Image: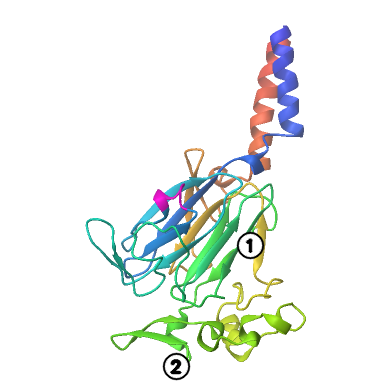
Amino acid sequence: MEGCLVLLIFSIFLLSEGPNLSHCARMFTIINNCKETVWPGVTPGENFNGGGFSLKPGQSIVFKAPVGWSGRIWGRTGCNFDRNANGTCQTGSCGTFLKCAASGKPPASLAEFTLAALDFYDVSLVDGFNLPIVVTPINGRGNCSIAGCDTDLRSNCPSELSVKENGKTVGCRSACDVFNTDEYCCRGVYGNPVTCQPTYYSKIFKQACPEAYSYAYDDPTSIFTCSGTDYVVSFCSKRNQTVCTYHNHKLVCSGSKSIKGLKGTEWKMIFGLTLLTTNLWLLF
């Protein structure tokens, strides 16, 4: 009887509080939906295969990152690595290594994360653009909006910002990277959100990608929050495209209405009510 009472109290606690998912690790599923091989880079990369790997078209890979991790994920293109994992890339290079210990060289589309009780995440084009990239939170609580840029800016990149290889545009540099002025780089007297305003070039980026950073102080429409969520980072995907990840050994997909896609509070209610019913039966 005493053991049953303990279980009953525990069940009631689950209903009222539940496990604090915001303190759990986050699952990251990285997907390549491009027609070309992508070499994702991650810094810090200790929890991501050392910070670098390759994904052929249609491939995906899953990693787990602890709460407290703060870093960035981007794609590298046009890479050629030897058996010792040394080589070069046309865009996003982090030096001559497959596994990145430093950030990618601009231009590079960046997915940025700070994992805490309340996660912050965004997609930034402040360092330019090299690939469409979308961040989709799944199974989280809060605002949890989809971030990213699903438009390929390479096809409409202004010629003065364009990076070409063999006559093909492979990246679109930022105005700061090209012109290196205080106005474009939001520094000096322009180093605050009042004086640093959208420019002709950042407006081109923003019009194409409304849910991504187009310049340093583009915060209101570009940074998002979510609690206790998993993330799908996909290259060359549409924002409304269904993506899936594994959560507690179950397949969970964006926009799912089934029990496989229930949010944390709904899982807690189902689990808690099941234990409560069982314990009441044991008591009476």
Outermost residue, left direction?
83
Residue 215 in sight in this render:
yes
Q: Is residue 77 left or right of residue 126?
A: left
Amino acid on which disc 1 is placed: Ser
Judge whether residue 46 is colored magenta. yes
Q: Position of residue 113 (x, y in %)?
A: 58, 58
Q: Which residue is mark 2?
A: 159
Question: Does dot 2 land on a helix, a strand or a loop?
Answer: loop
Q: Position of residue 31 (x, y in %)?
A: 41, 59
The residues colored magenta run 45-50
- Of residues 190 and 157, the one drawn nearer to the viewer in this rendering: 190
Query: Mark 1 and mark 2: span between their CA atoms?
Result: 33 Å
> Does 13 sit above or below residue 195?
above
Amino acid at dot 2: Ser
Please tell me how crowded label 2 is: few (under 14), some (14-19), or many (20+) other residues with Cα within 10 Å: few
Q: Is residue 168 left or right of residue 180?
A: left
Disc 1 vs disc 2: which is toward the camera? 2
The residue most toward the top is 1
Across and down, in percent, residue 224 comes to 66, 62
Q: Classify residue 137 by image quadrant.
A: bottom right
Element under disc 1? loop
User: Disc 1 marks which residue?
Assistant: 145
Residue that extends furthest to the front in the rendered view of this protein: 188
- Position of the C terminus, as image quadrant, is top right
Residue 196 visible in image: no
Instruction: Provide the major secondary structure of the magenta segment.
Output: loop
Q: Of the residues under marks 1 and 2, which one precedes in the sequence?
A: 1
Question: Is 34 within the magenta?
Answer: no
